[in-house]
Image (cartoon, rainbow, N blue to C red):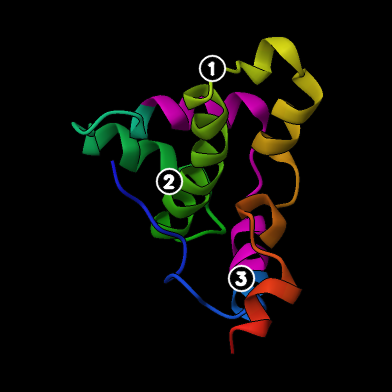
């Protein structure tokens, strides 16, 4: 599954705005894990995903899915490196699921990105 939060090379300020928008969708750890199961595979159960996103009444379904993808990608990257953060570092895992997202979570740093523009 391919997913990009922003175009490559986007300014740091755009990353900050994107993270602020995603942070408006508040997940519990259980919410996030349930959502991960819904988006994890190429075959998505659209009816189940629609029921899930409907629980977040203050957020558009597309924003809920975007917030899930952003958080899922953080967890999946660690898993791809052979690290199960839920087991080895539950505090970091919990932050990935429920804490505020910042550009640095996506390896975006102001000095590096803004120097390109």
Give the left or right position of residue 114, taking residue 80 as reference: right
The residue indicated by pointer 1 is: 82
Neighbour tally class for label 2: few under 14, some 14-19, many 20 plus, Cα within 10 Å: some
Query: Which of the two discs, 2 and 3, labels the residue nearer the N terminus?
Result: 3
111 or 51: nearer the viewer: 111
Residue 117 in view here: yes
Give the left or right position of residue 110, taking residue 47 as reference: right
Q: Point out which mark residue 65 bears.
A: none
Q: Residue at x 49, y 43 (%)?
A: 68
Measured Cα–Cα span from mark 2 to mark 3:
26 Å
The residue indicated by pointer 2 is: 54
The x, y position of residue 42, in whole percent, is 21, 33
Determine the residue located farthest toward the top in the rendered image. 87
The x, y position of residue 16, in whole percent, is 68, 71
**Residue 52 lies in quadrant:** top left
**Residue 13 lies in quadrant:** bottom right
Determine the residue located farthest toward the left in the rendered image. 43
Is 24 part of what is drawn in magenta? yes
Measured Cα–Cα span from mark 3 to mark 1:
27 Å
Measured Cα–Cα span from mark 1 to mark 2:
33 Å
Q: Residue at x 52, y 77 (%)?
A: 10
Query: Which of the two discs, 3 and 1, labels the residue nearer the N terminus?
Result: 3
Q: Secondary structure at mark 3?
A: helix
Write the start and end of the magenta stretch as one range. Answer: 18-37
Asked if the residue at tag 3 contacts the one at tag 2, i.e. Cβ–Cβ closer than 8 Å, the answer is no
- Position of residue 42 relative to residue 59, above or below, is above
- Total count of labels: 3
The residue indicated by pointer 3 is: 15
């Amino acid at each position: 599954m391919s997913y990009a939060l922003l175009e490559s090379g986007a300014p740091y300020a755009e990353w900050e705005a994107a993270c602020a928008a995603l942070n408006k969708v508040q997940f519990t750890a259980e919410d996030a894990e349930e959502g991960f199961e819904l988006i994890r595979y190429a075959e998505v159960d659209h009816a189940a995903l629609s029921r899930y996103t409907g629980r977040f009444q203050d957020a558009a379904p597309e924003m809920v899915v975007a917030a899930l993808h952003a958080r899922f990608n953080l967890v999946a990257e660690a898993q791809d490196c052979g690290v199960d953060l839920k087991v080895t570092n539950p505090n970091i895992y919990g932050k990935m699921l429920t804490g505020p997202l910042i550009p640095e979570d996506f390896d975006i740093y102001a000095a590096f990105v803004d120097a390109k523009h």
